[in-house]
Image (cartoon, helix red, strand yellow):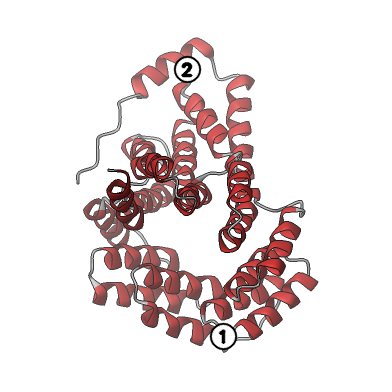
Amino acid sequence: MKRRKTLGIFAACMGIFFMTGCGGEQQKIFSQAEADLEQGNYEAAYEGFSAAAEQGHKTAQSLRGAGIAALHMGNWQEAIDNFTGVLEGDEGGKSLKQDVLSYRATAELKGGFLDDAMADCQTLAEDYSMSADTYYLTGCVALAMDSYDEASSNFEKAYAEDSGYEMAISIYEAYLNQDMEADGTRYLEAVLASGPKNAEDHCARGRIYYYMQDYENAHSELSDAMEQGSTEAKLLTGMVYLAQEDTENARAMYQDYLDSEDCVPAKGYNGLVLCDLADGNYDSALGNIAAGLENASGEDMQNLLFNEIAVYERQLDFATALTKAQTYTELYPDDEAAARELVFLQSRVG
């Protein structure tokens, strides 16, 4: 698949810029968009950055911000178009171009434009200094293209540059998503040899033990993290309890997470939905999905919408499940599990 060319908006932007001026109103819109992006209000951030770009205010930074917001919302093509606008423009230095090129490769990877993603990764390798993150990104693209040796080489370089918990987990998850869990497990085992220094480390170690199905050690690490004030550890502990089929404690932990000021509500509600599915409480599941979708975006929205299909299917309401699945696959056409689910539902309704 080839990437669409971004619209040539710059001439129009400059015209509006001179009519409206560069006064405080444009900066106010831009600053609010920055705040919305930081707070996870991605739709508002996208609208704000787009408005700033249309008014010619900090065009490169505004297009970058709109691209990042679109990336979080799963709007891959919109993200690519905005990042391309930065790269084709005259604003911004080398460091900005490098940053945006990495973001565009990420959007291309997620959108299935693998040849374009690899081309951007090659540009990063040729024109810029590679970092742990760019080695990791290149490894992910290579893995998606079934270039396993190239992926392994880049992941090893990424881990050599950054041998921390998050990098080890990220590499493991990349392999896990390709049903190659064993290739990623060695990174988890390697990073566990280092000792935890803070709540974040305990939380990461808890996640690793969860992946390794060592639930006793997972609980121990996450308990230490919660004692040190980690909200994320509550969410992960809910996952561990759910894996142990202890929905009562899982539900209590997800609720505790939702009661925390710095939680991401959609994540907590999705955890409650998983508990509801396990318990066969489908009305409650639909209520929690509705609550979660109020402020959901990106992967959290995708998870909630996928689970909504499962709820209607469990209720034997195949017609509604099919409608939901059709909408879902339009939004996320690369989800193979959803595509299989759609075929199954069509056979039941047809």
Asked whether 118 or 313 is in front, the reply is: 313
Asked whether 287 or 201 is in front, the reply is: 287
| Direction from residue 349 to residue 164 in the image, left or right | right
**Residue 271 position by quadrant:** bottom right
Tell me: residue 138, above or below residue 188. Answer: above
Contact (Cβ within 8 Å) of mark 2 with mark 1: no
* Disc 2, SS: helix
**Quadrant (top left, top right, bottom left, bottom right) of the C terminus:** top left
| Direction from residue 226 to residue 154 in the image, left or right | left
* Mark 2 → mark 1, Cα distance in angstroms: 54 Å
Residue at (34, 65) in percent of width and height: 140
Where is residue 46? Give x, y as percent.
Answer: 50, 34
Residue at the extreme bottom of the image, as rendered: 193
Residue type (three-letter) at the residue carrying disc 2: Phe
Residue type (three-letter) at the residue carrying disc 1: Leu
| Direction from residue 235 to residue 156 in the image, left or right | left
| Direction from residue 252 to residue 68 in the image, left or right | left
Residue at (35, 58) in percent of width and height: 337
Where is residue 72? Give x, y as percent.
Answer: 48, 46
Asked whether 205 or 63 is in front, the reply is: 205
- Residue bearing the label numbered 1: 192
Q: Residues within 10 Å of mark 1 (few under 14, many from 20)?
A: some
Where is residue 166? Give x, y as percent.
Answer: 54, 70
Tell me: residue 250, above or below residue 118. Answer: below
Asked if residue 90 shows in the view, the reply is yes
Where is residue 8? Give x, y as percent.
Answer: 30, 26
Q: Residues within 10 Å of mark 2 (few under 14, many from 20)?
A: some
* Disc 1, SS: loop
- Residue bearing the label numbered 2: 17
Asked if residue 233 shows in the view, the reply is no
Tell me: residue 21, above or below residue 8. Answer: above
